[in-house]
């Protein structure tokens, strides 16, 4: 092989493949994917998680309320008929 043919091959490979452009496109797609995941979490998953946690909290709070006996009789005294 001659030096001129090697130069031609290297020029062809440089023209056909631009790694900087591919890296930029891959990074842009990655950022878009991350943004879509963030939207999925904030729009879909957080409301369901909040609903579930709210129900768990209310169940726990009510069970504690009943266990401690903090009903009407605690605040208003015994009501006799």
Image (cartoon, grey):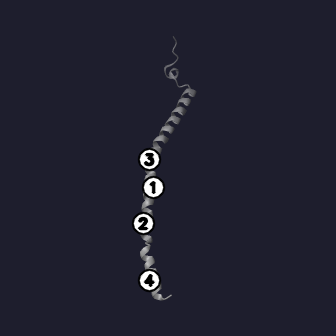
> Mark 1 highlights which residue?
34
Q: Earlier in the sequence, mark 1 or mark 2?
A: 2
Of 26 and 56, nearer the camera is 26
Q: Earlier in the sequence, mark 4 or mark 1?
A: 4
In terms of secondary structure, where does tag 2 sit?
Answer: helix
In terms of secondary structure, where does tag 4 sit?
Answer: helix
Is residue 17 positioned above or below 76 on the image?
below
Q: Residue at x 45, y 87 (%)?
A: 4
CA gap, disc 1 to disc 2? 15 Å
CA gap, disc 2 to disc 4? 27 Å
Question: Mark 4 against mark 1, which lies toward the viewer?
Answer: 4
Question: Mark 2 against mark 3, which lies toward the viewer?
Answer: 2
Q: Earlier in the sequence, mark 1 or mark 3?
A: 1
CA gap, disc 1 to disc 3? 12 Å
**Residue 76 screen position, x and y as percent:** 49, 20
Of 63 and 2, nearer the camera is 2
Is residue 23 positioned above or below 43 on the image?
below
Within 10 Å of disc 1 (Cα), the crowding (few <14, some 14-19, many 20+) is: few
Q: Are marks 1 and 3 in contact (CB under 8 Å)?
A: no
In terms of secondary structure, where does tag 3 sit?
Answer: helix
**Picture quadrant where residue 30 is located:** bottom left
Instruction: Specify the label residue 8 is tagged with.
Output: 4
> Mark 3 highlights which residue?
42
In terms of secondary structure, where does tag 1 sit?
Answer: helix
**Residue 73 screen position, x and y as percent:** 52, 20
């Amino acid at each position: 092989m001659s030096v001129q043919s090697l130069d031609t091959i290297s020029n062809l490979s440089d023209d056909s493949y631009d790694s900087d452009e591919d890296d930029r496109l891959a990074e842009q797609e990655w950022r878009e994917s991350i943004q879509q995941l963030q939207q999925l979490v904030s729009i879909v998953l957080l409301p369901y998680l909040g609903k579930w946690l709210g129900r768990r909290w209310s169940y726990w709070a009510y069970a504690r309320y009943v266990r401690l006996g903090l009903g009407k009789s605690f605040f208003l005294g015994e009501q006799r008929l």
